[in-house]
Image (cartoon, rainbow, N blue to C red):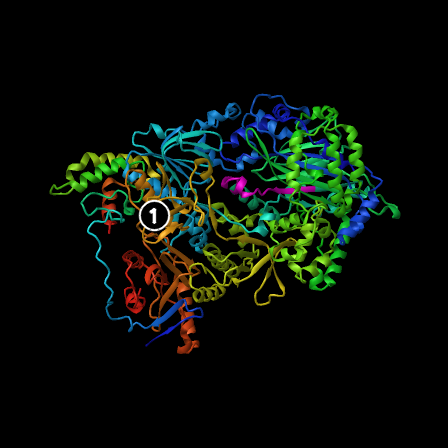
Amino acid sequence: MQIHYISHLASTQHFNLVKRALSRRTLPVLRQLIQADSLQTTASLRLSCLLRYTSTNSSNDEQTQNAEKKKTMTNLMYIVGGLTGVIAIYSIFQNRNNSKEKQPSVAEYDSRHIKSKDSDESNKTPDEKDTNMEEQKSIVEQEDSDSVETIKKNDLTSNIPNFAQYLIIGGGATAMSAFKSIRAHDPTAKVLVISSEKYLPYMRPPLSKDIWYTDDDDLIQKHSFKQWHGKEKSLYFFDDEFYTDVKTLNDQENGGVAVVLGRKVVDLDLKKSIAKLDNDWEVSFEKCLIATGGQPKTLKIFQDVSNHLKIMLNNQTLNSADFPSEHSSKLSSQKIYLSDTKYIFPNSLTNMTMHNNIAEKLDLSLNNNSNPYSVEYELILNWLNVYQSSSLFITITYGILSIISSKQIPNAIEIIWDTSSTTSLFIRFKCTSTDFAQKRHGGETGIPLRIQVDTYENNIDSNKHLHSCCCKIQLFHLKGAQRKNKADKMRIGKLNYDQHRHYQTALEDAILQSGPISTLYTLNLLSLSYRPDDLFDACTVSTIEENSLIKKQVDDDFEIENKDNDCSESLSSILSLSSSNIKYNSKQCQNYQAKLETKITMRSSSGEVLHWLNHNSFFSVVNRFQYYTGVDLLRLTKNDIRQICNGDDAISIRLHKQLNETIIQSLKILYITLTNSDIYSTIDDFFTLKNIVDSGANVAIVGGGFLGSELACALAYRSKENAKNGKPSGKIIQLMFEKGNISKVLPEYLSKWTSDRVREEGAEVVTNIELVDASLQEGKISLSYIDPKEPRKTSYVTTDHVIVAVGIEPNTDLAESAGLEIDPDQGGFLVNAELQARHNIWVAGDAASFYDIKLGRRRVEHYDHAIVSGKLAGENMTGAHNPYWHQSMFWSDLGPNIGFEAIGLTDSGLQTVAVYAKGKFNDEGQKGDSDGNREQKDAVPISNSNVLKEKTSETRPTTDNKNAYNKGVVFYLKDNRVVGVVLWNIFNRIPIARKIIKDQQVITDFQELAKLFNIHQD
Amino acid sequence: MSFCIKPENGKDKVMFLTSDDLSSPSTIKLKDDEQFDPWEQHGLVLPNGSINWNCPCLGGMASGPCGLVFRRAFTCFHNSDANSKGSECFTEFSSLTQCFAKYPNLYGSKNKSSTSQPTTTSATTAIADALSSQT
């Protein structure tokens, strides 16, 4: 098949060639964009896409199709017309050297950009204008015309000083507290903050608390919220004017604080005291504070899927009315379009800024979804008018930077776009068949279109393959497809639930599944980056290595063939390939082999199988497959696996899926929408989530910690408010592995009681579960889990979005280059009691594992800790030598009825003694602390909570009153000394608690201790 | 009336106490603090009489762009023993006011935002605010 042929074409060429070729070929517009963009995002990821397809009428079509039919069971009766193709995306090399010549083939597609450029008004593409204007402003002032084109990277970064008296890595609360403290102790200090955020330092706690209870949307749009006392407050710590311009920082007589946004420190050289930024700019420093905070964790089952690049493909939106001429002529061509192309990159490879962009994109696409493709319609109609030609391949699109087609290879097209903006790609294929009936019924068959996207990250001197994914797309005659879908739906609807799960009706979106890198798709497509005109030459380069290689491919293809009948022709096509003399670079082969190892092959030994099982988290069944080799495993049918797994559906289905992970699988694919790529902590994420909740979507929250619980309450509240106002409202469900909410802090009984209160807030809470799988069903995510109450059965919950809030892990990427020690137990940079890691290097906030001279080594992930430790670090950086002494506190609000403050070591594993107030609830206090960050208790919730309490005291007899943990204080003990205190629904008593922890007296009578807290009063 | 329960695992004890149970003064005596603990956080004026520029009560005042000018003015005011406190600090105060004027958004008074022009905080109000908020 042609596909294979193409893939092999895409193999080689020396890297330099690639560089050269790209530099010649890249459009000026693109270069501009890259340059402009390198100002703001550190992961300057650019993609370009190489799309090639061939439309051939293969004689094997019918065979292929029949095989397909067997395999996918639902959809394939009508597949007849088709085409074949491979789209591959690779990152274009970011070469900024010269070459302003434009490829003529590009002009047509790029006219829009060129026009705007000629009119001398654009140094940016429209897409870019949408994003991150403010950052650019702060970094580059010279936005005048064509400057960007001439600016070299060095010119841009020269805005960042190359020396910093005080360097702070990270731009969160810790950094803010530190620079404030530094400036307070050293009045003329010059502080340079390198933040990967795109906003100036801001507060995160309100994002899961107060802002959800703020009813004024205008206020929220201004990034402000209402405090508990009703006053509005900005999320930002300081106004822009507080900060000094980065460029002039070192010229300021009185010093100042300057923040570099959207940049990340990637390397720390302590020998020379130099920090290297992700754009290679080096800043030498006198003293440095590392305040990198943490990165949200994700779960294995989501990780697998969240790396996927998702391309939504909609081939149903076009109805016949729009294209009368096409339809009356019996549709000799089919149109599909790819829209809302979205990317998710593994967090480890991109930075926050990138993520923010992604979140914004989601925002856009949500809007699009509610107003389906109106823009696209117009574009298509336009296109139809303009290009009524017979050309084989035409696109209509927006957000695409350039499209380059090759003269030498028919139908080879490379598409380049900017990942930081929403991109829509319309591709029209002309089908080779004229009818969509099966051949034996007089029609023609077609070859299904296959799309593969390879994503590369490009640095200055290397290109790293991030991942590949692909899917198969089948095209239907519109009427046929509709009829087919309808029939399918009806058929599936008749099945019972269990059978139901085995099927999936046609998706509105085609999802690219990240595939194992197989021969077909492994090619380092970068090597195809010649000038299009050179492609032909590349194919004629010959080499000696090929024989062994081809053989290997044959083996691998054979293995694929087992699962993918589409590949049944691969053998022959590859053999025919050998004459086309493709040069392979041996290094690529090794890489490719390394990737293959993550897959079970026919020749896998039992050890490899075990490793693979463990690697893919099939821990529970590993021992059942102890002696299986690769062949044995692959031979198993779905039912066999099910039996071996003791009838455990969830595991066996997943195992079967993963074993038979075919590259071409458009049905039943795991998929998670962008939101649950889950870095909920930035401003943009808040807006994304707010839109989701307001749209009435169902949301599942995974994780029972602070963030998860607070969000569950906040989202339930918001949803309830929406329902009251007649707006759409969705269902909120919280799933957790723990036995109750915030069980890491609260003792078990209190944690369970709290879960009941969260339920009263309107969120469904399911505790103690084991999450086993996530899958996509009819556009919704279905999470399957084991409920301990019914251990033999797998339970399911279906939802629109998933938020994963399972904690963070500290960002310690810098440790390696800097040679800093990491705490093996708790993570984080290991620092002493003065928060110092090395001479002139301090660490504070979430990323620091410090020694608390009262309570021992700790790492704390709370806002107040960020403030306290940042302040301490700032003091010590300016010459003080103070240890961590002042205990930080933290607080949490779960809806209007539960709020608590805590201080010290509050680990639910410790022994606890709690004293709760009994009887006489005569007051309900205003919550509020000195920081003014508390949530408001306005009139309505108070009366609610009073009602609630009356109810509980009425309905429960005195002896049963034990469940009313409404108000009280919990002491956490180590050796009969109080090491931590939780103030449950009582407020403003932190100083007393702090004093008790500081005193470290042996306490035996807790009634006496409780008296100090006066728990009956507010 | 009070009672004690021990939820299942015995590790966590729970007491329910009425306000009567807790009404008498506690027998637990907290240790006296040191006179001046340099490790602790302090208010605006340290026990030794010097100014704590890192006091949260100052907000970003001492760290911001007018930090140095503010320090001069406030130090002058703080150390003043003239009859009307701060009367000899006129130059410092006026330079502080000038500095404030350069950053209307940062130092503008937010309460009067209804007026079209944001009014700049005067030096005296800033210092008065700082003093009043130290408690």
- The percent position of residue A730, horizontal first and vertical second, equals 56, 58
Q: Is A111 placed left or right of A860 in the picture?
A: right
In the image, residue B22 sits, relative to residue A888, either above or below, namely below
Q: Report the span colored magenta.
A: A337-355
In the image, residue A496 sits, relative to residue A317, either above or below, namely below
Under mark 1, the amino acid is Val
Query: Label 1: how many residues lie within 10 Å, few (<14), some (14-19) or many (20+)?
Result: many
In the image, residue A914 sits, relative to residue B97, either above or below, namely below
* Residue B9 seen by the camera: yes
Choose between A11 and B43: the one closer to the eye: A11
- The percent position of residue A75, horizontal first and vertical second, equals 76, 52
- The percent position of residue A935, horizontal first and vertical second, equals 39, 56
For mark 1, what is the residue?
A: A868
The N terminus of chain B lies in which quarter of the figure?
A: bottom left
Total count of labels: 1
- The chain carrying label 1 is A
- The percent position of residue B9, horizontal first and vertical second, equals 44, 68
Task: Assess whether residue A42 is covered by the magenta stretch.
Answer: no
Choose between A391 and A819: the one closer to the eye: A819
Task: Assess whether residue A345 is covered by the magenta stretch.
Answer: yes
Q: Is A13 placed left or right of A994 in the picture?
A: right
Question: Which quarter of the picture shows residue A474?
Answer: top right
Tag 1 secondary structure: helix
